[in-house]
Amino acid sequence: MKLSSKNQNNITQPRPEFKIFNRWDVVTNGWYQVLDSKKIKKGKAIGVDVAGQHLVLFRGESGALYALDGFCPHMGVDLGIGKVVGEEVRCFFHHWKFDGKGQCSDIPCLSEKKLEIKTSAYCVQEKYGKIWVYPSSKAPYEILEVPELKGHEVTVSHGKSYKRKCHFHVTMINGIDPQHLSTVHNINMNMNVAIDSSEKDTIDIELEGQTPSSRTSERVVKALLGDRYAYSMKYQGGCLAALSVMKGVKLFNKWEVLPTLHMLFAYQSHIEGETIVQPIFLTKKRNFFIDRILLFFTKMAFKMLQGEDGEVYENIRFNTQNLLPIDAPVSKYIKYINSLTPSVWSRESAPEIKSSMRKKRELTV
């Protein structure tokens, strides 16, 4: 019988277990991308799986969107096959109705007016043409925006989602690992790194350095784009990342006329051992023609790196036993992940979640 890679070489190559980082059984509080907004019309409900949790999304007759736990608390039928009535969803089986806050408003076989039955409701928002859910009824912050695009109207394009065979916490390290730029992508730069984690549930990492000129290709890039190079990553909730590249480059080392390219990555695990990544490409709205050109170049920049990185993240069993000083951004990132708050969607196998859920049950029994 073949063992899962997570169990292989544990004696000869032991790995530390973290509070949250690289844990499939812990789902942190954060905004999780669900599906395209246009897929739920007024008066429709749909069952969806998000970060291992089954939900029902429904759009009321007013156009407002709601998210509840996906199974009816009566006998467990999927509410996604139910019917939307006004601003409520009605279970297909016994016609119990639930409002957008999860409160049961009607049980046809009962005459009582006051009903104490309730199911969990979650905060839901629409942004970038997508529906997003936060694993609590209230969210302490809005969905991540690219810092350079804040306050600007943006044009959006969705990339095709893809899967990785490692935890998304590991794939999110990709943009802040200076060593792999040289070894995997053949981009040699001495990077200066600035890290800021003062904002709740976020970490900002700025990387900038001098464009190298040891090879012909590097000298061509330096002549075209200048002698300085910078890019930045901003993470939110351990499941959403913003990347900005081509920051401050100068055409022919003279003119700052080339725009920065921006993209978002929404991450989640669907099943243990499999990560789903949804890329979203963004640009400040200018006009139809220019926007499409910039989004095209953004996609090309992403695809150029995606294939090479895929070889790594399809074949990794992440270990932190021998991190070097150059890996400081990675160490800081892991510390940031471990500072986040586990959500109610976490599996009970996580000790801290199991304890909190036990206390909750004791209070309700």
Image (cartoon, rainbow, N blue to C red):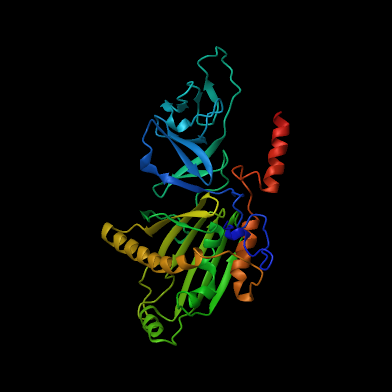
Residue drawn at the location 45% of the way across and 61% of the way down: 148
Q: Position of residue 42 (x, y in %)?
A: 37, 33
Residue drawn at the location 36% of the way across and 63% of the way down: 299
Q: Which residue lies most toward the left here?
A: 289
Q: Position of residue 230 (x, y in %)?
A: 47, 72
Q: Position of residue 55 (x, y in %)?
A: 50, 38
Q: Which residue lies most toward the front here?
A: 1
Quadrant where the N terminus sits is bottom right
Q: Quadrant of residue 215?
A: bottom left
Quick check: can you spot residue 132? yes
Quadrant where the C terminus sits is top right
326 lies left or right of 277? right
115 lies left or right of 307? right
Relative to 248, say whether 364 is above or below. above
Front-most of residues 258 and 156: 156
30 lies left or right of 216? right
Front-most of residues 160 and 163: 163
Q: Position of residue 250 (x, y in %)?
A: 39, 76
- Image mark count: 0
Quick check: can you spot residue 172? no
Relative to 147, say whether 253 is above or below. below
Residue drawn at the location 39% of the way across and 43% of the way down: 37
Relative to 133, say whether 82 is above or below. above
